[in-house]
Amino acid sequence: MRIQTIGLMTPGDMGQAVAQQLLVGGFDVCTALDGRSARSHALAREAGLRDLGSIRQLVDACDVVLSIMNPGAAVDFARQAAGALRTTGRNTLIVDCNAIAPDTVHGIAAEVQQAGGRFLDAGIIGPPPRGSARTRLYVSGPGAADLEPLAGPQLQVQVVSERVGDASALKMCFAGLNKGTQLLWLEIQVAAQHLGIADLLERQLGQSLGGMRDWSLANLPLLPAKAYRWEPEMREIAKTLGSAGITPKVFEGAADICAFVAQTAMAQETPEHRDPTRDGQAVVRALAAAKAGTAPRPR
């Protein structure tokens, strides 16, 4: 398959960074900004993306459309893309790159294929590929190797299998360990503030689990701005575990934590516009205060 024009929905934090890597690779990268937020417009303009207006026009003009968005919006976008496929009569390749369960992916694949399009399953693992950061796009499904030309120095493409769902299963398991661990550390540290033993716990963690403590605190400043999309991701992980015969309750709880964080003032910030002076400990203290509605209990 020859790929020249790539559609990308949506140009958020990750989507914009991926789009920039594709532009560097010489592709014509487009998006559809009808009804999108001022932030999406600004990020697309900053990246130099070509705005085609509607999803119908995006599907009609592009060889491939990459869906990189809040996982809670993935199914709705797939339905809109399927409607565009029917209207245009195109067989555009739709690639879902979102953090969703294999069962959700199979439903999206059926929607797209019944509308006459091609479908591939993908999962992104790694930070937004800006600066020196690199990320990996895992792909599965029939003809997954068609996406290998998208690879570049900072965007690696790895074919998992010819089976739809495998890339998403990998993403779900990795995110469960990575983000799930971050949320567990956050939950415990907030609880320690209310129990009045935060200083004692900090000393013990430094003695026993210093490396993990430092990793947790280093990641916490980024978490509030992402909590609104981590919540549906945790629910997709719970769905994945349930389909595997494992209890989903741990990640249902993780979703509840994200929902709480997403309601705080810090969560109104965006990844590109957040308080750079707020460290991990400050995040914990602010969330403990927000949970109680007052300052954390004094020692």
Image (cartoon, rainbow, N blue to C red):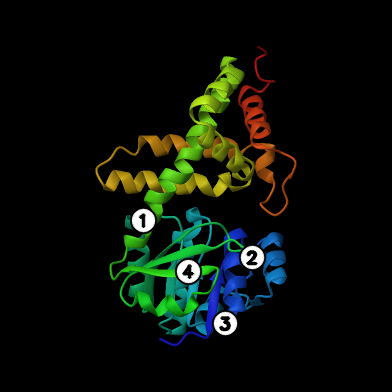
- Which badge, 1 or 4, is on the more N-terminal residue? 4
Residue 89, percent from left and from top: 42, 85
Q: Which residue of the protein is positioned furthest toward the top in this rendering?
A: 299
Which dot marks residue 35?
2
Alpha-carbon neighbours of circle 3 within 10 Å: few (<14), some, or many (≥20)?
some
In the foreground, 20 or 38:
20
Mark 2 or mark 3: which is in front? 3
Residue 107, located in which quarter of the rendered image? bottom left
In the foreground, 15 or 22:
22
Residue 43, located in which quarter of the rendered image? bottom right
At x 28%, y 71%, the residue is 162
Mark 3 or mark 4: which is in front? 4
Amino acid type at image mark 4: Gln
Amino acid type at image mark 3: Phe
- Which badge, 1 or 2, is on the more N-terminal residue? 2
In the foreground, 277 or 74:
277
Mark 2 or mark 4: which is in front? 4
At x 41%, y 44%, the residue is 177
Describe the element under mark 1 as helix, strand or loop.
helix
Describe the element under mark 2 as helix, strand or loop.
loop
Residue 182, percent from left and from top: 51, 39
Amino acid type at image mark 2: Gly
Q: Which residue of the protein is positioned furthest toward the bottom in this rendering?
A: 2
Relative placement, left or right, of 151 versus 287 is left
Alpha-carbon neighbours of circle 4 within 10 Å: few (<14), some, or many (≥20)?
some
